[in-house]
Image (cartoon, coloured by chain):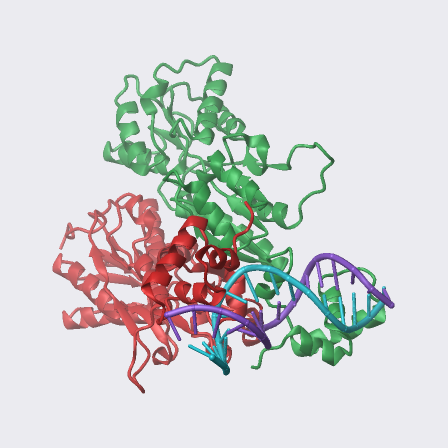
Chain colours: A red, B green, C cyan, D purple
Amino acid sequence: LAKITIDDVARRAGVSIKTVSRVLNNEPFVRVETRDKVLAAVTALDFTPNISARALAGAKAYLIGLLFDNPSPAYVAALEQGALKVCRASGRHLLVEQVSDQGPDLARRLAVLLRTVRMDGVILTPPICDRIEALDALDAAKTPYVRIAPSQAPERSARVYGDDRRAAYDMTSRLIALGHRRIGFVAGPPEHLAAAERRRGFLDAMHAAGLEVPDVDLGQGSFTFRSGLEAAERLLALDPRPTAIFCANDDMAFGVMAQAHRLRLDLPGDLSIAGFDDTPTAEIVWPRLTTVRQPVVEMGEAAAEFLINPPKLEDGAPPPAQLMPFDLVERESTTEPWAG
Amino acid sequence: LAKITIDDVARRAGVSIKTVSRVLNNEPFVRVETRDKVLAAVTALDFTPNISARALAGAKAYLIGLLFDNPSPAYVAALEQGALKVCRASGRHLLVEQVSDQGPDLARRLAVLLRTVRMDGVILTPPICDRIEALDALDAAKTPYVRIAPSQAPERSARVYGDDRRAAYDMTSRLIALGHRRIGFVAGPPEHLAAAERRRGFLDAMHAAGLEVPDVDLGQGSFTFRSGLEAAERLLALDPRPTAIFCANDDMAFGVMAQAHRLRLDLPGDLSIAGFDDTPTAEIVWPRLTTVRQPVVEMGEAAAEFLINPPKLEDGAPPPAQLMPFDLVERESTTEPWAG
DNA sequence: CTGAAAGCGCTTACAG
DNA sequence: CTGAAAGCGCTTACAG
């Protein structure tokens, strides 16, 4: 009920508050006997140091920030879940902050934020992770940061990323192996690096198999359900029609699926559809969506891990980078084409 | 670059730090002229007070907590989005904390958390909002809290809730108005108050229309996709078959839909399906799901608002409660029954 | 209406 | 190996 401070612990253990502080922070040069006395008092009183006092007095803030803007809520929620897990395990807390990507004063707003609430490190998601001015502001405030799937200056900071190009290559190759020859592609916004990489991977695989891609720009989308639906309107009007459509994300694949349903196509017989992300909805739609699983929760974990337990680097070594593996998840939305 | 403190502002404005503090906290008894000088200095220096120092020295922490466990990620993400919006607008920050609902030491864990990081208030989501010991711990720590859709002791604290019974009544009535007579119901876990209320509302509407509900327990589910699918296996085996199925949440409705697809039923002609929640997926499935929209983002906003700008209550008045409206969202998954 | 002093609960830098 | 003092950047309680 009453609040318990380091003084209470010190008194009970019969030592100074400085010694309690040493034990709390795992500093060396404490006699085992003394340490045990302190730990016993800590346990008996259920003491945990106050985070504000620690932040004010010392170098650590015990606070990790997750900065995002205008996200796919599911994507940010998954990152958050991963980050939260690591934070809990290491006695950190997670502050979630929406930082508008718009406006010329991004750097100023970040500087103000970091002065207002000091954080030990910050996780940056797309698209703000690609605003160089944001990185400059973080550096100026000496706040470490990890970026998730950055496309600008990837080597500049610690990052967690996936090999989108390779994953798209593999998925396309799988469709080709099933027997598909006319494969449509619905691309994401070209300024989005991951989208561009996925497009690249698709084209690589098609060319490697000696397959033509006559109208690759016909399927241009913007990662939204609606843009997928509209891309499908165009692609499915082709003659001959594609027997498979690969989409650069799941939401667009759902749009393609909706359009196929409207046209009363039989799925997957008339049209195989594959997506990218493995959103929860992929298991719910009919037929269930074949897609590329991106381990987003694990990416959140890896990012928090970089901040909390930074790997030791040699001088001049590039910042740490963790490549996360993709998985092909084959469900019922893909099959062999009915008519060659 | 260098950090700016209240001393810098005071020096620049030619006043004491106490006067700067007064202006910052909107205290009365500051001459307009003095206030203007201070505000000019604040603006010129881009000053914002440090949250740790404020929390340590004063009564306010400028921190709101969102406490959850094992959630529907989409539900928590939506609440968070609403809470975040209000926090930003009022200069607060949002701490997200997963607190396991399991274990007998919930009260102790909360007490430790609240001593470690003081918060001005806490938003409690189901199921922890229904653990009385958690409420006791919060009261003991004198931390205000708002509960989202509590089922235990609802009058005990501020809360934001919806009229689930009424919404289920309305949706059921709508199906009846379309001409359905044999309507199946897929219920959520009975210990979940909202689930029980939705079941109640369904039964009320059926009785009010003089319709029989022979096997109401046949559709028992647990809010998961799979449980909806299994409930549909049972309900669709009935003879005569229901012409409509109303589910206590969307996830189960998607399960019913999947089972209907497996049985090669024509949707919605052979079977109308309605859900509850209006999850993002409701617009993506085929046919798009008729459902009850619950304004979850707005509930997050309302909860944060209660904490940040608590309504003034008369002595002895019950804690504030905000009833949120539901909306019936009619899409293509419901229609008139084909064969009476 | 304004300010000087004390203190919030810790860590840092220094002394022993 | 341990501790006394100072200080982090604010607000509180008090004085004027």
- Foreground: D4 or A228? D4
Residue visible at 74% across and 36% down?
B314
- Relative placement, left or right, of B274 versus B317 is left
> Quick check: B111 above or below B214?
below
- Foreground: B56 or A253? B56
The image position of residue B237, as x and y in percent, is 25, 22
- Relative placement, left or right, of A268 versus A318 is left
Q: Tell me the quarter of the image containing the C terminus of chain B.
A: top left
The image position of residue B193, as x and y in percent, is 46, 29
The image position of residue B89, as x and y in percent, is 62, 58
> Quick check: A317 above or below A211?
below
**Res. B99 in view:** yes
- Foreground: B161 or A273? B161
> Quick check: B145 above or below A54?
above
Q: Tell me the quarter of the image containing the N terminus of chain B.
A: bottom right
Question: Residue farthest to the bottom?
Answer: A316
Q: Quadrant of residue B243?
A: top left
**Res. A214 in view:** no
Residue visible at 33% across and 49% down?
A280
> Quick check: B13 above or below A295?
below
How many numbered circles does the render carry?
Answer: 0
The image position of residue A81, as x and y in percent, is 38, 54
Residue visible at 77% across and 60% down?
B27
- Relative placement, left or right, of A161 versus B198 is left
Q: Quadrant of residue B93?
A: bottom right
